[in-house]
Amino acid sequence: YFHSFDQSNFASRLMAMGKPVYNAVTRYSEGKPSIVFVPSRRQAQLTAIDLMTYHQSIDGKTFLGKESNTEEISTVAENLREPALQQVTTFGIGFLHDGMIENDWDKILELYKKGIITVLVCPMDICWNIKCYSHLVVIMGTETFDGRERRYVDYPIADILHMMGMASRQAIDNSGKCVIMCHTPKKEHLKKLLYDPLPVESHLDHYLHDHFNSEIVTKTISSMQDAVDYITWTLLYRRLSKNPNYYNLQGTSNVHLSEHISEMVETVLGDLEASKCCQLTDDGDVSPLNLGMIAAYYYVQYETIELIAASLTAKTKVRGVLEILSHASEFGTLPIRQGEEKALHILARNLPQKLPESAQFQDPRTKALVLLHCHFSRKALSTDLRTDQKRVLCESINLIPAIVDVISSNGWLKPALAAMELSQMVVQGLWNKDNVLLQIPHFTTEIVERCEAYDGEEKIESVFDILTLDDDVRNDLLRLPDEKMADVAVFCNNYPNVEVTFQVIDSDDITTNDPVQISVRLEREIDDEEDEDQDDSDLGKVAAPLFPKDKREGWWIVIGDAKTNSLMSLKRVTLEKSQKITLEFMAPEEPGDYNLTLFCMSDSYLGCDQEYSVPISVAVGDSDDDASSGDESE
């Protein structure tokens, strides 16, 4: 069923749809489950409240299922986090959105699938995330606001078809019903799109750079001809001749097809070569370069790796790395919702560090930077911004190791250490200058101040110091209830206590320009009682209440010379109980005594990094002796 509305203003049109949505649900659902799709999270809540109000005022009834228990539903509603959700759930209506806590999401879906609530209201952007079906689907509006373009854009036709397809309860209903409410000028266009067969087209040509880069690294593509052959195995190749206008093809003959694919391959490989991800010879042979390998290993877009390599310098600090990270292409698709520019501007004014002068609040990358700043400052955010922040954090923890690898390729020590500190900041939600005790759950600035003012035998400066306190002293300093103290205990017990030992192999026989090997052993110190109780799989699991997903510890082992800012060797390892690795690097060109530094850097915790002095003596190598004797004979 199509229902069109003449109001040209988007907000007015949505208000006009309120009563018709209720009429559609009561008329077509026949008491069976219904799903209503709306343009935004805020509209989902408003529509759920409108449905409840209309049904109560007109019929004096609820949308609860026939076999539902009022007491049971009231008990479930009391345990929900959102007040609006608690209210509408008791009337048989639920709503979902991306920013909900997982517990509420699962409970609402469970109530819907059991038939206890019969109406579910969802924003359109989660239509692919919910795995449930209904007798009736109502699509309330077919446009949503795009902040990047600053206008309302139509839903993708594939999304509309998917929403319509959810009105199908197999083996229960003989038919499903769908009501589409739209702007009057769009009605005929939507009818044509929905009633006529819709061809499935390929969009591989928009994402070909990263595909090619991965295949070049794995040696699947080693020449331009291999790249052309690769395309002939894809849906893109099949559709080029079937729908040439869609792909800007000049004709459908073999000559036209061949020229189009060759031009596409040349353009893509040329872009990859310009970004230093691959090397192209005059004969058409293609080979991977270091940046391309890093991009393929970490699944980073080629534009991002090019930006990282071009922006980093030997003097880049944490702030510079943070700005480079926020400008990654991966954040280019962050949504900018209506009114968010103002909210971001207000947040930015209260941040401890100023944004770059070029920052524009309609730019998704500026939004990513603001959200990272808010994470480090632990600022409260709206539901939508919190959802976007989770996405930014998950992407960031994948991008930072790529940044570290690019820096290590250039042999810069201080920027590499800065990037590693940034990884710790992202996981724990703190600035690197904050007190490390703030990592501990439920610790506030007041508790930290009490710990700093503690006048005991030893000052409280690290997480380990909290563990060594007597119970009475600890309780007096923290003043937390038992359940919060349990969280503190879990964090402190998970906090890594790693012993690092190292040995320079053949330290008496190091000569210029010869490889030097350093054997490093990491061993986690575990109490015997904990060792018996703790499963090996739990070792290395990071306690990070502000990070949105589970993470395991990673460690960077670095050898460098702080005086010359040179990074000589780097390895990233995971650690359960113990780990042994060998670092190898070339000895300096000049003979003499050198004082290098071994860094053991965590990627997840602040305050547990270690550094050790590694003195080495470099003697004159054989090649140097030969050269000097040759000079003397002359």
Image: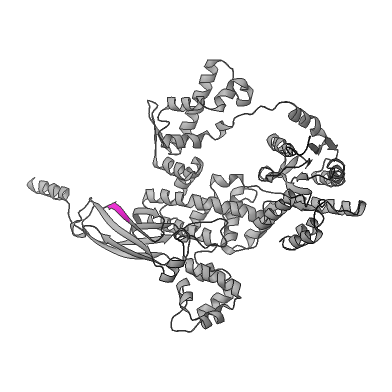
Q: Nearer the viewer, residue 447 or 466?
A: 466
Report the span colored magenta. Answer: 581-587
Which residue: 44% across, 46% down?
309
Q: Nearer the viewer, residue 147 or 361?
A: 147
Vertical relation: 67 (above or below) 209: below
Q: Quadrant of the C terminus?
A: top left
Q: Quadrant of the N terminus?
A: top right
In this rendering, position of residue 188 left or right of residue 125: right
Q: Nearer the viewer, residue 465 or 482?
A: 482
Vertical relation: 425 (above or below) 260: below
Vertical relation: 321 (above or below) 161: below
The quarter of the displayed image where residue 14 is located: top right
Which residue: 51% across, 56% down?
551
- For the stretch drawn in magenta, what is the main secondary structure? strand
Q: Residue 516: x, y in percent?
A: 25, 54
What is the total number of numbered labels drawn onto the structure image?
0
Q: How is the image coloured?
A: one colour
The reply to whether residue 444 is in sight is no
Q: Residue 584: x, y in percent?
A: 29, 52
Q: Residue 434: x, y in percent?
A: 52, 68
In this rendering, position of residue 381 left or right of residue 515: right
The quarter of the displayed image where residue 354 is located: bottom right
